[in-house]
Image (spheres, helix red, strand yellow):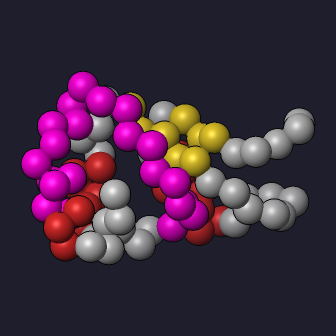
Amino acid sequence: MDMNKAEDWAEFNDIDLSDKTLILHKRPTNDLRPKELEKVMTAKKLVYMTVWECDKIPNQWKEVLNDVDEIIVPSEY
């Protein structure tokens, strides 16, 4: 789903997430609108799948990542 499309948001909003794992494939930033964030936080399990090239996590991402159940990143370490 492309959450930038109104029709996809409407479809997503109708899904009961309370028994589902939601995987967000995006940078962990605070760019979700309040209505989207409220819906996302109802998921039984919240997973961020993200990619970045740096030697440490940017400070502004820490708050977001602390609220998820799992983080998936490509790594050999």
The residue segment tinted magenta is 9-29
Determine whether 48 is above or below 70 in the image.
below
Q: Which of the pair 59/15 is nearer the observer?
A: 15
Q: Is residue 3 visible?
A: yes
Give residue 20's quadrant in the image: top left
The residue positioned farthest toward the top in the image shown: 19
Q: Can you say which quadrant of the picture contains the C terminus?
A: top right
Magenta segment: does it hold 74? no
In this picture, residue 24 sits left or right of residue 52 = left
Q: Position of residue 66 (x, y in %)?
A: 53, 46
Give residue 38's quadrant in the image: bottom left
Q: Residue at x 23, y 37 (%)?
A: 17
Q: Which of the pair 32/13 is nearer the observer?
A: 13
Q: Position of residue 37 (x, y in %)?
A: 29, 58
Q: Position of residue 71 (x, y in %)?
A: 60, 41
Q: Residue at x 46, y 51 (%)?
A: 24
Q: Residue at x 51, y 67 (%)?
A: 29
Q: Position of residue 32 (x, y in %)?
A: 35, 68
Q: Which of the pair 15/68 is nearer the observer?
A: 15
In this picture, residue 72 sits left or right of residue 69 = right
Magenta segment: does it hold 24? yes
